[in-house]
Amino acid sequence: MPGIEPERAAAFRAELLRRVGMMGREPDADTEARLEQASARCFRTAQPRHAYAFFPLERGKDGICLTGTRLCLTGRSIAAYLEGAAQCALMAVTLGMQTEREQRMLAAAGRLTEAVLFDAACSAYIEIAADACQAELAAAAARRGLRAGGRFSPGYGDLPLQVQGALLSALDAPRRLGLTLTDSLLMLPRKSITAIVPLVRQDGPAKSEE
C-alpha cells in the first residue's frame, strides 16, 4: 500500500476496516475505491512525527512521579500497570496539523462521506504510527537492558486526563512536535497519541498493552 511500510500495511487496513465498521468483511468495489482514495489522501497530507524519553520512577504517597519532571501519576490502574517497573518511557505521536486542515476543507465543502472516510484513515494511521514509535522505543530500551511493555494513555482506568499537560511538557512536545492541549484537555492536532510505557529489567515480567 503506497505511503506506508509494507510490513504495516495489513495492520493499517485491518484498523481502517474496524474504524468503518467492516471488520471481518471485505468491502465491495465502490467502497474499496473510496477507502483507497481516503487512505491516499491521508498518506499525502499526514506528517507523522514522534518523541519519547526514559525516566526513573519515584513512588510516594502522592503517586508515582517521574524524576526531573512535574508529572506525577495517580490512581490504582497506573500503579498496578507500573508495578515492578524500573523506569518508564513517555511517548507522543502526531500526524500534524495538515490533516486537521484537510478535514476542515472537506467538511466545509460538504464532502461529508469523504470527510468521514478521511477521518477513519487518519485514525488508523495514527495507531500505526504509534506502533512504529513504540517499536523504536522498545529497541532503545533493550540497548539499556530494559524490556518495554505496552502503552497506557491518560484517561485509561482511573489515570486522569489532567496529567496530559505535564506529560507533554516532560517531552517538550509543544516545541518538538507542535502538539498542544486545549483548556478542555483536547490534544491538537487531534490525530495524536500519548502514552506511558513501563520498562522492566530484561529478566523481569513485561506488561502487555492495555
Image (cartoon, helix red, strand yellow):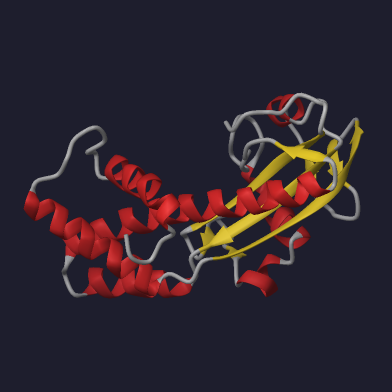
The image quadrant of residue 87 is top right
Which quadrant does the N terminus fall into?
Answer: bottom left
Q: Nearer the viewer, residue 66 or 61?
A: 66
Instruction: Please state the horizontal and vertical placement of residue 176, each as a whole percent of the image.
Output: 68, 72
For residue 87, above or below residue 93: above
For residue 66, above or below residue 80: below
Q: Is residue 30 left or right of residue 191?
A: left
Q: Is residue 161 left or right of residue 6?
A: right
The image quadrant of residue 30 is bottom left
The image quadrant of residue 4 is bottom left
Which quadrant does the C terminus fall into?
Answer: top right
Q: What's the residue at 48%, 65% (across, down)?
A: 95
Q: Nearer the viewer, residue 45 or 137?
A: 137
Instruction: Please state the horizontal and vertical placement of residue 136, each as a whole percent of the image.
Output: 65, 53
For residue 185, above or below residue 97: above
Q: In this view, does 18 lie to the left or right of 55?
A: left
Instruction: Please state the horizontal and vertical placement of residue 26, each as a whole percent of the image.
Output: 17, 40
